Image (tube, rainbow, N blue to C red):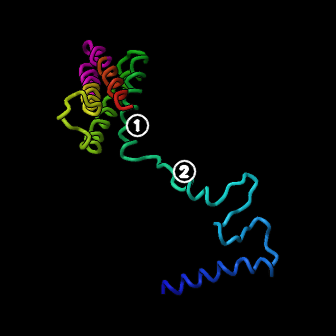
Amino acid sequence: MIKKCALALTLCCSQAAIADDYFSLPDQWNFNTTEPLVLASSDSTSMTTMATDTKNVYEDRLITANKLHKYLGIGSLGAALITGIMPKEEGGPHEAFGQTAAVLGIGAVITGLIFHWDDFDLSNGFSDPDNLHLALSTLGTLGFVAAVGEAPDGGHAGPGIGGAVSMAVGIKMVW
């Protein structure tokens, strides 16, 4: 069956050059059998170039496991920074963004542990950027959780600011 299909395909391709003499075909088609099929266009893009260019063939997916982890971490840091500039009133946006930073940070830590567990190896200690990323980002999340837990009674700015700095440095370690 495969041999018959290959034979039929070969005959079709070899007859394409002959068909050009008998039929009036559009000028943009090139039936040169020694080179791949090329479409003439205004920007001179050939089918061969498009087929070998992986950017045209495979598009990057919007959400992947790694991107989810990344977006949660960056979102946590962004929410923490917004928390710092919001008016400090109970039940207001300062409280909402603080809680959002803590929740997104927890999500980033959980997805990091799930998707990047193989990157964590204590044989190199904390000189390994992946280990330092894990430690600092987890510490940053704990700072956010501590700040939310202490609010509104006492001084929760220290753990919140410390968590934001730790999270920022942890994110920078892998970027």
Magenta run includes residue 150: yes
Quadrant position of residue 31: bottom right
Instruction: Identify the magenta region.
Output: 141-161
Quadrant position of residue 153: top left
Magenta run includes residue 154: yes
Q: Earlier in the sequence, mark 1 or mark 2?
A: 2
Three-letter amino acid code at the position of disc 1: Tyr
Residue at image x 35%, y 19%? 90
Residue 157 location, x and y as percent? 30, 14
Residue at image x 43%, y 46%? 63
Q: Which mark is residue 55?
A: 2
Three-letter amino acid code at the position of disc 2: Lys
Magenta portion: prevailing SS class: helix
Residue 153 lies, with reference to residue 136, above or below; the image says above
Relative side of 107 to 5, left or right: left
How many marks the image carries: the answer is: 2
* One can see residue 162 in this view: yes
Residue 158 lies, with reference to residue 66, above or below; the image says above
Residue 106 location, x and y as percent? 28, 34
Secondary element at tag 2: helix
Please rate how many residues cluster around mark 1, counting C-alpha atoms within 10 Å: few if below 14, some from 14 to 19, many from 20: some
